[in-house]
Amino acid sequence: MAGPMHALQAMRAIVGREVAKFMRQTGRLVSALVRPLLWLAVFAAGFRNVFGMSVAEPYDTYIAYDVYIAPGLIGMVLLFNGMQSSLAMVYDREMGLMRLLLTAPLPRGWILFCKLAATAVLSLVQALAFVVIARLIGTDLPLWGAHTPHLLLAAVGSALMLGALGLLLSVHVKQLENFAGTMNFVIFPMYFMSTALYPLWKLEESGATWVWQIARFNPFTHAVEWMRFALYGKDAGLSPWIVLGTLALCFALAAWGYDPQRGFGALTKRGGGGPPGGGG
């Protein structure tokens, strides 16, 4: 039992550290909520009558545009926190903290999974805060019912997948100053070329074939669709499997990338265990 207990203690310490750090950064929560709430309160209101939402799965009747984009905005919260957490990973690596963690007497993959779990916890806290405020300003989301466990599973799976994607990015971004451009290169195409703001069939109907094809294979599309269908207790088809498959692939590649014997992780580039910039 010493091994499992030690592993759980490490997870509690890492997750607790990230949560405590987040609690001291109130501006981080505010900035995480301002962006999707502006989209909900301003963009959805302005385009309410422009984007007519016909009856299509998973909806049984016509819906307001703000109701349609709400799952996509929840996905936006999860996506941005996943990327921000990967920025924190790069910072921790620059400061040497990740090197200390990765020398702990625990499997490297478990240490990284603990970091991923911390990212998912913070993502879900921010998503919950967004949902509460969205309900208060009048967005009608069916959160409670027999489908609630399915909705929680979809949210957790999506948070883990987007966190794993950020973790994978942090393997390849070697310097902190290069990360902002990388984040924009990933976040905006991933968000806008998805079903977060418009249904997939509208993209095909409008003739934007290449955007439609990208959106079909975009894992963020499937994260949003999984949450959207789960809200109404409907079968999301292949979306859950695509999300979980992407999660497994991104995490496996990230864990492989942090293996110093593979040769392309930043820890190896710095020469193993020596201090940054050290040497005679």
Image (cartoon, rainbow, N blue to C red):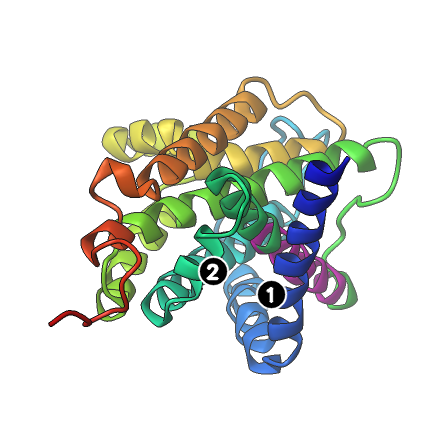
Which disc, if any, is residue 85? 2
> Which residue is depicted at the point 49% across and 33% down?
247
Whether residue 167 sits left or right of residue 76 in the image: it is left
Inspect this view and state whether residue 237 appears. Answer: yes
Residue 126, percent across and down? 64, 62
Residue 179, percent across and down? 28, 63
Q: Write down the residue under mark 1.
A: 18
Question: Range of the magenta residues?
Answer: 119-134
Question: CA gap, disc 2 to disc 1?
Answer: 9 Å
User: Dot 2 surroundings within 10 Å: few (below 14), some, or many (20 or more)?
Assistant: many
Inspect this view and state whether residue 52 appears. Answer: no
The answer to if 246 sits in the magenta stretch is no
> What amino acid type should be assigned to the residue bearing mark 2?
Ser
Secondary-structure class at tag 2: helix
Seen in the picture, residue 53 relative to 46 is either above or below; the reply is above
Res. 148 image quadrant: top right
* Dot in front, 2 or 1: 1
Whether residue 125 sits left or right of residue 104 in the image: it is right
Residue 57, percent across and down? 62, 26
> Which residue is depicted at the point 73% across and 40% down?
2
> Which residue is depicted at the point 50% across and 68% down?
35
Residue 23, percent across and down? 66, 76
Seen in the picture, residue 105 relative to 184 is either above or below; the reply is above
CB under 8 Å between callouts 2 and 1? yes
